[in-house]
Amino acid sequence: MKITVNDFSTGYGGFEVLHHIGFDIDLPGIYVVLGKNGAGKTTLFRAMTGMLGPYTGSIMFDGVPQVQSTVRIAYLSHKYSIPAGMNVRAVMKFFGKVEGVSGEEVDNIIEEFNLRELLNKNIQGLSQGQKKRVSLAKSLIGNKSLMILDEPTANLDPKVSGEIRELITRKARDSIVMYSSHNLYEAMDIGTEVIALNDGKVVYAGDISSLKTDSYKIGIRGKGIEKLADDYTIDGKYFVFNLKSPSEAAELISRLTSAGAMIYEVKDMSNPLERFFDDSS
């Protein structure tokens, strides 16, 4: 599958949000759409799914305009989009019928996303992480060529975020996944390519490895960290660690949580994309 976005602009009610953007995607992988809040990530995803039409330019799937394409898309919005009055079993059966798949395929998704113990629970009674797992699972029912995931780990703790990223990585081996985030740490942990947006413009598109540096600074907000580590500095509410790579960050977080620290947030403190943001502002 090949995606071509050419000179594309769109927005809401005549107000332009995306301005003449362009990029190509033609290989399986996880393409992280990275940008600050308000950069245009959700607007791009709504355009990719056909909810927003072009003001200028086009979005093409395999040479066919998006609105005419038969490409099947799995779309996970930043909202849960699951019926609150149903239990998990009913939700999965309902979306299985909508997608026209067998009960066996739905059961396979249930097992893959570890939903068996949740089947009889009402959606309203689930935790944030459980709701996200159900939302992602129901979005991936059926044979989808493209996955569009809008901040799938937003408002989740680091442990649950890691579990969600692991599920997505498994599903993405032979697919194109567009995954939005405002967190470079998360982007470098999961992505192969990055499309960076700022003020509705593409400021960088390319291999995420080219953004990696010899030093990597993260801030961790939580409790008990000062008792378990001594190689940090303090910046406001954050314990700041200078590391060499995102893998070191993952190891550090795992070590701290295993030792009993409560981690509320992990934030990249030195962002190689800032030079693009500064130039375009």
Image: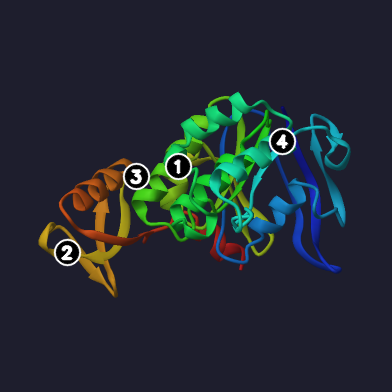
Instruction: Left or right? Give the position of 27 relative to 246.
Output: right
Task: Work out whether mark 4 precedes mark 1 in sequence or the reverse, and give the earlier one.
Answer: 4
- Tell me the distance, in whole angstroms, between the alpha carbons under discs 2 and 3: 22 Å
Of all residues, the one furthest to the front in this rendering is 120
Image: 70 above or below 280: above
Task: Work out whether mark 2 precedes mark 1 in sequence or the reverse, and give the earlier one.
Answer: 1
Please tell me whether mark 2 sits on a helix, a strand or a loop.
Answer: loop
Binning the other alpha carbons within 10 Å of mark 1 as few (below 14), some (14 to 19) or many (20 upward) gives some
Please tell me whether mark 3 sits on a helix, a strand or a loop.
Answer: helix
Circles 4, 1 touching at the beta carbon (< 8 Å): no
Which one is in front, 122 or 137?
Answer: 122
Q: Which mark is residue 97?
A: 4
Circles 2, 1 touching at the beta carbon (< 8 Å): no
Amino acid type, residue under disc 3 in the picture: Pro
Measured as percent of width and height from the top left, residue 149 is found at 60, 47
Q: Nearer the viewer, mark 4 or mark 3?
A: 4
- Picture residue at 69% right of the left edge, 28% below the top: 101
Q: Which mark is residue 165?
A: 1
Instruction: Left or right? Give the position of 205 relative to 119.
Output: right
Amino acid type, residue under disc 2 in the picture: Gly
Q: Which residue is mark 2?
A: 224
